[in-house]
Amino acid sequence: MHTNPIEALEDRGATYGLLARLFNREVDEDLLEALGNLPLGDETSSDAIDEGSRLMRAYLAEERPDTIRELAVDFARLFIVRTARTANAPYPFESVHTAPDRTTMGDARDRALAAYREEGLDKSPSWTLPEDHVSLELEFEQTLCLRAAEALRREDETEAARLLAKQRAFLANHLNNWVPAFAETMEAYARTEFYRGLALFLTGFLEEDGSYLDALLG
């Protein structure tokens, strides 16, 4: 646990960034190598984080010739391929989980986009998915973390507090509104221990981050 708030913010930002990448696209060779070097499995105050880390670490520790392909197939099953049999699959869009008709491009997408634009952000032209995709929402939290850290470096505590309050509000009004249900379904549908573990890690981290922000902002 960091006592330096700038280091803590940077670490939190790095975790948000990693989660955003893992939900953005399939694991490739470079990411697989990086994941193998992460200190997954350290004991924390979150059972979900610890169990999720354990499952991911155990999967990555197994030697198999087709890890990349196996993870790609599971990623596609979970987040891309849809059939009549996957009506309750883990759709990675906030609108699907919060709109009465479970469709994309709903009010949640509009509110997420408005939050990004309030901070001068917009999605890359190459990004074709709706703005309420889990990866973009996690990336937004990463940006707020890193901007708050930079504000503290400038000794601008007012701006840092504003950014942290924005992060806490976005976490409460967006991610925590739908990610627990999304992750629960993801854990049930995943065929690899890696993605089961990722589902647990995600929910545990968001819960811990909410508590961290509450304590930091008083």
Image (tube, rainbow, N blue to C red):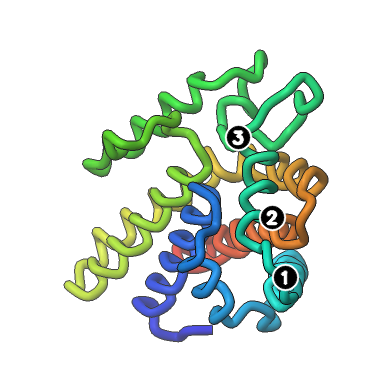
- The amino acid type, in three-letter code, at marker 3 is Ile
Q: Is residue 99 above or below residue 179?
A: above
Q: Are marks 1 and 2 in contact (CB under 8 Å)?
A: yes
* Residue at (68, 26) in percent of width and height: 82
Q: Is residue 10 above or below residue 117?
A: below
Question: Which image quadrant for residue 84?
Answer: top right
Task: Where is residue 211? Give x, y as percent.
Answer: 59, 63
The residue that mark 3 highlights is 80
Height in image: 192 above or below 13? above
- As helix, strand or loop, the secondary structure at mark 2 comes to helix
Q: Amino acid at mark 2?
A: Glu
- State the quadrant of the N terminus: bottom right
Disc number placed over residue 70 in the picture, else none: 2
Q: Quadrant of residue 126?
A: top left
Q: Which element carries disc 3, helix, strand or loop?
A: loop
Residue 64, numbered label: 1
